[in-house]
Image (spheres, helix red, strand yellow):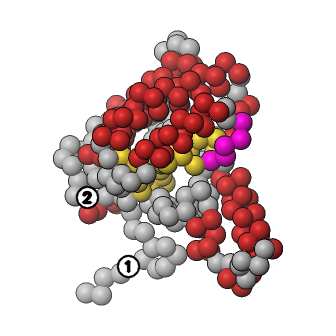
């Protein structure tokens, strides 16, 4: 059965204390969603923006503190120019149209990824969104835009190497924790749950360092069909798993 056709067994809002603190989502399947309906890919991307709005609202309602969305990868520049232009336009419109409401709802916006290949208008909009909302505390919405995990790790390593070369850091003090702080996501907890839509089962260069102990849930639904119910379905799968972090399974001593 297609995941979009399944209903979640619980319609109630789960206890916030047992919700994942950080949910990351690879939003996949816009093009295939459109193709199956005989629509242009651009309409798939536009429908995907509506799914973003639903998901942000659901994260707020469910008291999830951190939500990271993979919106545009550094590899996506290889797509046709018309599609890239449409994606850039959607990102700009999302910031212009939704920023005030996000700010009103106490949502902090962060954008991770490289700023190269991004036009000045986009940079200005990103800076405005991040600056306006930086003190907000209800939800941190992290948008991975022009993002690639290998590039992120490389840039973090370069920054650490520069500190060593300048005498600001002893090589003996290079730790996993310092590396974590040097990443674009420094200060943000690692995702506990990663969701990928469309049935694909790979990370696609997304949060490779941060997902060392993340639980993965792969849904068959295309991103434009993503809903609060599917988010709850993924959370239900997450809660059913035993997270051992490299240790042994918990065993009853009774």
Check residue 116 for magenta coloring.
yes
Quadrant housing residue 166: bottom right
Which residue is at a point 31% across and 58% down the rendered structure image?
Answer: 19
Which residue is at a point 43% across and 51% down the rendered structure image?
Answer: 134
SS of the residue under disc 1: loop
**Position of residue 97 measured from the top left corner of the image (x, y, whole percent):** 41, 27
Residue 168 lies left or right of residue 139; in this view the side is right
Residue 18 lies left or right of residue 196; in this view the side is left
Check residue 236 for magenta coloring.
no
Magenta residues span 113-117
Q: Main secondary structure of the magenta part?
A: loop
Which residue is at a point 31% across and 52% down the rendered structure image?
Answer: 138
Q: Relative to residue 53, is residue 155 depicted above or below?
A: below
Count of picture labels? 2
Q: What residue does disc 2 label?
A: 16
Q: What residue does disc 1 label?
A: 250
Residue 236: image tag: none
């Amino acid at each position: 059965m297609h995941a979009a056709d399944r209903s979640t067994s619980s319609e109630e809002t789960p206890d916030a204390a047992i919700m994942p603190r950080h949910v990351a989502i690879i939003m996949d399947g816009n093009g295939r969603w459109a193709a199956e309906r005989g629509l242009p890919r651009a309409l798939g991307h536009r429908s995907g923006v509506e799914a973003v709005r639903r998901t942000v609202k659901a994260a707020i309602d469910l008291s999830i503190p951190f939500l990271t969305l993979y919106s545009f990868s550094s590899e996506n520049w290889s797509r046709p120019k018309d599609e890239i232009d449409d994606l850039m336009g959607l990102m700009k419109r999302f910031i212009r149209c939704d920023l005030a409401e996000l700010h009103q709802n106490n949502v902090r916006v962060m954008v991770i990824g490289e700023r190269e290949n991004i036009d000045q208008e986009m940079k200005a909009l990103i800076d405005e969104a991040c600056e306006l909302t930086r003190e907000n505390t209800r939800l941190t919405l992290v948008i991975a835009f022009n993002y690639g995990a290998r590039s992120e790790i490389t840039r973090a390593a370069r920054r650490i190497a520069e500190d060593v070369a300048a005498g600001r850091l002893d090589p003996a003090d290079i730790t996993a924790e310092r590396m974590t702080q040097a990443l674009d996501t420094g200060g943000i907890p690692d995702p506990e749950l990663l969701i990928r839509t469309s049935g694909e089962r790979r990370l696609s260069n997304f949060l490779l360092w941060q997902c060392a102990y993340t639980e993965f849930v792969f849904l068959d639904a295309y991103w434009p069909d993503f809903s609060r119910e599917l988010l709850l379905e993924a959370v239900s799968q997450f809660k059913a798993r035993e997270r051992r972090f490299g240790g042994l399974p918990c065993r009853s001593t009774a």
